[in-house]
Image: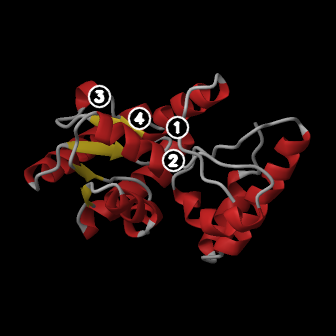
Amino acid sequence: MHTHSLGEYMERLDRDSWKGVAEIMLSSAEKLKKAGADFLICPDNTVHHAMPEVLKRTPLPWLHIAEEVAVEAKARGLRRLGIPGTRLTMEGTVYPEVLTKHGIEFRTPSGLDRGKIDQIIFEELVNGIFKSEALGVFRGIIDRLKAEGCDGVVLGCTEIPLLVSPEASSLPTLDSTRILARAALQKAIGVEAKVAKP
């Protein structure tokens, strides 16, 4: 396991520098290869936007978080997913591209709800602050996604499952971090998993 500081990532994200994000991901990849890793994972949904650039030069194959979520959704018979996460995840292409490829529909929260989610993530959750009011906001957003026909919800940010449990959601939850971790474990012990190759 290796990571650069969140600050290093945020400095590049604030400049919309996906090539810069890719550079620090590749730096970690090189260190992990030298440490003996066979494949790589990144539990951060947002930085998967840099994956196309990473895959051009990666020293090792990667498991892709959205691919693993799509595989799990299909296995559970889910057809339309709501996608809360950071603003960059909700407004970006990572999940839309992968889910569309797998024939899964998706919905993102409204612009107002996207702003609320992003604020809760960066002002509260990443700082270890878990308020009942924030849970209420998430519950309301998930209820609205359900009303739009979603039959499952992706917890598309590492910190969201720390606040939103399966029991607190009106929709079945797909904890992207847990799904990726499970896929990595299966891959490590030899169970077939989808691997994004360079």
Q: Is mark 3 in CB contact (under 8 Å) with mark 4?
A: no
Per the image, label 3 sits on a secondary structure element best described as: helix
**Quarter holding the C terminus?**
bottom right
Residue underneath mark 4: 161
C-alpha span from label 2 to label 3: 19 Å
Q: Would you call the spot at circle 1 few (<14 residues within 10 Å), some (14-19), or many (20 or more)? A: many
Residue 96 appears at what percent x and percent y? Answer: 36, 64
Q: In this view, does 36 lie above or below 89?
A: above
Q: Is mark 4 in CB contact (under 8 Å) with mark 2?
A: no
Q: Is mark 2 in CB contact (under 8 Å) with mark 1?
A: yes
Determine if residue 131 is in view: no
Q: What residue type is labelled 1?
A: Leu
C-alpha span from label 2 to label 1: 6 Å
Front position in the image: 46 or 192 = 192
In the rendered structure, find residue 65 and report the number of the disc placed on it.
2
Determine if residue 77 is in view: yes
Per the image, label 2 sits on a secondary structure element best described as: helix
Residue 49 appears at what percent x and percent y? Answer: 55, 65
Q: Is mark 3 in CB contact (under 8 Å) with mark 1?
A: no
In the rendered structure, find residue 166 and report the number of the disc placed on it.
3
Query: Is residue 24 left or right of 73 when viewed as pictured?
Result: right
C-alpha span from label 4 to label 2: 15 Å
Residue that sits furthest to the left in the current view: 147
Query: Is residue 43 left or right of 73 when viewed as pictured?
Result: right
Residue drawn at point x = 19 percent, y = 37 percent: 171
Q: Which amino acid does label 2 sit on?
A: Ile
Residue drawn at point x = 64 percent, y = 77 percent: 15
Closer to the camera: disc 3 or disc 1?
1
